[in-house]
Amino acid sequence: MGKRIRIKDIAERAGVSTGTVDRVIHNRGNVSPKARAKVLAVMEQLDYEPNIIASTLAYNRITKIAAVFPDPSTDIYWSYPLQGIEKAVKAYRHYGVELQRFYFDLFDPTSFSKIAFEALESNPDALLFPPLFLKESEQLLDASRDKNIMISFINTDIEGRRALCYVGQDSYQSGVLAGKLLNIGYRRPLRTLVLHLGKETTNAKHLLDKERGIKDYFSNTYKGEAPIIMAHFEDFEDEAKLRDFLLEINQKHPGLSGIFVTNSRAYKLVKALKEEEVDHLRIVGFDLIPKNLEYLDQRKISFLINQNPAQQGYLGVMNIVNKLIFKKDIDRIQHLPLDIVVSENAKYYLEREYQFAI
Amino acid sequence: MGKRIRIKDIAERAGVSTGTVDRVIHNRGNVSPKARAKVLAVMEQLDYEPNIIASTLAYNRITKIAAVFPDPSTDIYWSYPLQGIEKAVKAYRHYGVELQRFYFDLFDPTSFSKIAFEALESNPDALLFPPLFLKESEQLLDASRDKNIMISFINTDIEGRRALCYVGQDSYQSGVLAGKLLNIGYRRPLRTLVLHLGKETTNAKHLLDKERGIKDYFSNTYKGEAPIIMAHFEDFEDEAKLRDFLLEINQKHPGLSGIFVTNSRAYKLVKALKEEEVDHLRIVGFDLIPKNLEYLDQRKISFLINQNPAQQGYLGVMNIVNKLIFKKDIDRIQHLPLDIVVSENAKYYLEREYQFAI
DNA sequence: AATTTTTATGTGTGCGTTCACATTTAACTT
DNA sequence: AAGTTAAATGTGAACGCACACATAAAAATT
């Protein structure tokens, strides 16, 4: 119906050539104020919108995205965002998007720095990574600014306006939600353990936000001090030690009714404890990784909060494309929903993750 | 890096002209078997993938999508998928996608037929609608097949292979999930009411599936007959009558602890009942419409299941585009997740819906 | 063998941009 | 005022593909 307006149409109406219109649109300069004004007026009047299809065809350049991620072979979780990234790059390959992957050691900030700066050396147009290490990430932000390389965060955020965007969850609110999930069906606050299970001490902010969240949930709901126990256990690979640790807590604080595991390792709890020890516990954790799902299905884990990792990866790339290629404005913070997963609805989230991957 | 392969490259390698390659790719005929074989071989060898960008630019045609929907002014719910549709059409306008909207009366199958056939008369490339009325929708399927118009379902499915795809929830499983939500925190089955609130009797399958789901949940969980009461109340606009109706049920079946409203009208219950009557009830309903959200926030409604209507609309269009323009294969059934919404995570779902709208 | 018909193949223009380059016009110099 | 420099404007090729049209080759007809 409404025929699309072309640069040529604007040129004719404004009494100039297409070259001049192009210069106005892209602020390339060398345009007289009169001509510029006239062109802008006509553009406004005709409500011109550039044809992205034709534009990308003619632009004919490659947009390089460097993804700097923890080595997925040491922690399966990180393979999911990478799959989402892969899929997005495939979807946008006709727009000239290319990807380069860089892996660092999840537990070693120095490795992150080294690898990330290697990535910078390859002169990408944008850098996509989870800023797990605050100090090192800040350094990277500075360096990339100097080289005019765009930064996009995923999974974890660093406040400030220096990155294009953050795609991931609201950690604080995920803590609040965990509180709610541990409290459904009860009319009084029951004794709850918040457990950080792992040796990632560096990205503490993340975890502290979740702590704050669950504390606030209980104190706001019951107007008083929350009966919450905080704990941190590093050596999660040793099931026997973990069990001793948990039993000790249970002795010190009898009547423990729920545990909130602040990362994807909730299944470790179930593995470490005996069946009858788990049965009267309500366990809430994160992420739909296979071992968690198995226990969710057996009702050993009550709730999982889904972080949509593949979708995070996909959206991270999509934002870069939207900004760099489609010239769209991007929301600085893009919180993904806090999906409450029980065994009755897990399947659909897995399917969706699958859609965003490979 | 890996330079993209063009039709021209194939033509050179195969010793033919670009025209011949084009004829092979699009099966336009008039190609000798030898040339055809040679071209196909080279395409295979070089792993050719057409450049969609250039293709759509050159193709230069319009794809018309007709959306046939219940008039959103009579039921706000239907405005959401329409917004998603609108947004998707905007996103794909450079690919030549155009939209025409047709509204029918939600409570009148005849109106649906009339409007839908009007839509067919406008000769769209695809028809997108919720097949709420089975018989009338089947007729439409036949007619559209004759005119070679593609059909895409949303919200409700009709089994069979005659439509391109269905985007929406799994009704049965949403019933199962509702059962779970009404049961969390309890170790025995409590008396539960399943309430169809409204005069839409025609799309009964939808509702029956939900009924089956929640029944199965309880009987599977507790290995026995489920203590479930089924009810249907049409005159939901009259709060007094609705209250009487509910009180009567409560008298007949004392100890009623939860109500599952099978559509988006859970808020009507809260409105009709007195505060103290609601307080000891756990209410589960559908959809994040403003009135439901208000009561969710006040803890009068415990859970809402989100149908992602805007996303449904967006995806409905996206599927048509993927098939018709990008020539991709489409999954016949695309179940959206059954999002469990509580007041602690509602915000993020609203934000996402907003992203898929306008 | 010449002619017509059918089938196969090649060529060139257009889709709406971008951008380098050529050309024109205006603004300074001396 | 003529010459030089800078600024403004116009032109045309390219991006990769689709398709109409022209041309060439093969097959069928006389």
Image (cartoon, coloured by chain):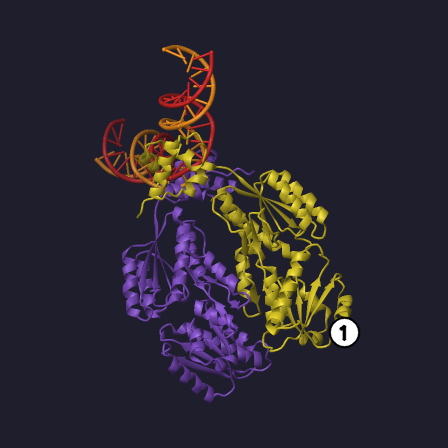
Chain colours: A yellow, B purple, C red, D orange
Quarter placement of the C terminus of chain B: bottom left
Q: Residue at x 42, y 79 (%)?
A: B272
Seen from the viewer's position, the closer of residues D29 and A164 is A164
Q: Is residue A357 above or below residue A338?
A: above
Is residue A241 visible to us here?
yes
For mark 1, what is the residue? A252
Counting every numbered tag in the picture gives 1
Q: Is residue A142 above or below residue A312?
A: above
User: Element at badge 1?
Assistant: helix
Quadrant occupied by the N terminus of chain B: top right
Q: Considering only vertical position in the picture, is C29 above or below B14?
A: above
Q: Return the residue found at the far bottom.
A: B252
Q: Which chain letter matches label 1?
A: A
For image coordinates 53% across by 46% down, the residue present is A320
Of residues A315 and A214, the one drawn nearer to the viewer in this rendering: A214
Q: Is A93 positioned to the left or the right of B138 in the image?
A: right
Quadrant of the image occupied by residue B34? top left
Horizontally, residue D5 falls left or right of residue A191, namely: left
Q: How crowded is the residue under tag 1: few (<14 C-alpha within 10 Å), some, or many (20+)?
A: few
Residue B316 visible? The answer is: no
Q: Is residue B309 left or right of residue A261?
A: left
| A265 and A228: which is toward the camera | A228
x%, y% of residue B22?
40, 40
The kind of residue on which mark 1 rests is Lys
Instruction: Using the image, determine if residue A12 lies above or below residue B189.
Output: above
Hey, which quadrant is residue A185 in on the image?
Answer: bottom right
Residue B67 picture location, percent across and down:
35, 59
* Residue A331 pos. (x, y %): 51, 51
Residue that appears at 52% across and 57% down? A355
